[in-house]
Amino acid sequence: MFIDSHAHMFDEKIDFEKIDLSLLDAIIVPSYSMENLDKVLNFCNKHKQCFCALGIHPFWCNNFDLNKYVNTVLSNKCNVYAVGEIGLDSLCEVDYLKQIEVFKKQLKIAEEFNLPISVHLRTKQDFNSFFSIIKNYKIQCAIHCFNGDLEDCQQAVDNGFYISFATNITYKGNKHLREIAVGVPFENLLIETDSPSMLPSCFKRKGINTSANIVYVAETLAKIKNCEVSFIAKKTFENANKLFNLKLKEK
């Protein structure tokens, strides 16, 4: 059984009811804007496999409303399992200082509510800024859709953070990710689809990515780490269960 540690399965492109999710015990479903906080909450309340994360992505942080965000988390505390998707992105048009400001506010909330974070980082600048900032907070972290270098990976592991590999690890051009993944300790490993984007390479970019495709990430990791897919499933299940405090029983 798998846990997809990051998937926007509430997206309107996805027909959730028609997807075979029999291999999944859980899906962490993060928001990314103020506009879909309630949508994610309602979606996760409706689907028992889905666990809510609330956060504002750097792309949408110009519209961040601290009071509304805090009130939403506070009033739904029992149903919120992480602060995410949050982070930094030096390639987007939003002012970087504004991104840092909103990121720090969400880190403070995560610390106050004792919630882990799911983090978006895209460039070396983003990783450097993240590591400089995060040392001031006591928070557990998943670096979602990891796309850093070996140094970034090692620094994350040294801090006890989780490295989450997504379906883009299956792409021919991402050999560097597969090389990095070889050295990631199983205790720090997570898997995700980041649906609805980034279909696995075998689909040739045709269609909509969903959590059902988590198996392709697991198969790729099993091949490069020379182990069984069932072992990847077991370790990433344990890690996600622990990080997000899901309290799921292993089957």
Image (cartoon, rainbow, N blue to C red):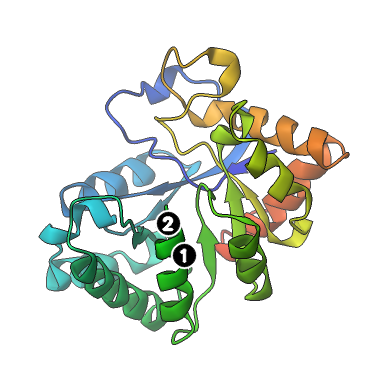
Distance from Cα at disc 2 to Cα at disc 1: 6 Å
Q: Are marks 2 and 1 in contact (CB under 8 Å)?
A: yes
Q: Position of residue 59 (x, y in %)?
A: 23, 51
Residue at the disc numbered 1: 127
Nearer to us in this view, 219 or 205: 205
Tag 1: residue type? Phe
Which SS class for mark 2?
strand
Image quarter (top left, top right, bottom left or bottom right) of the N terminus: top right
Mark 1 neighbour class, 10 Å CA radius: few under 14, some 14 to 19, many 20 or more: many
* Quarter of the picture holding the C terminus: top right
Query: Would you say residue 247 is visible in this rendering?
Result: no
Q: Is residue 148 above or below residue 16?
A: below
Q: Position of residue 220 (x, y in %)?
A: 72, 32
Residue 64 relative to residue 46: left or right: left
Could you tell me how many numbered marks the image carries? 2
Residue under the point 43% across and 33% down: 195
Counting from the top left corner in percent of width and height, residue 250 is at: 74, 50
Question: Residue at coordinates 35% horizontally, 24% vertically from top-left?
Answer: 14
| Element on which disc 1 rests | helix
Name the disc covering residue 121, or none.
2
Q: Residue 203 occupies which quadrant of the picture?
A: top right
- Residue 168 is drawn in which quadrant? top right
**Compared with residue 26, is residue 97 higher up or lower down, i.e. above or below?**
below
Look at 33% across and 80% down and name the residue there: 108
Let me know if residue 4 appears in the view. yes
Q: Which is nearer the N-term, disc 2 or disc 1?
A: 2
Residue shown at 18% from the left, 68% from the top: 98
Q: Tell me residue 187's x, y (percent).
A: 75, 61
Q: Residues within 10 Å of mark 2 (few under 14, many from 20)?
A: many
Residue 174, numbered label:
none
Q: What's the residue type where badge 2 is placed? A: Leu
Residue 174 higher or lower than 67, as above or below: above
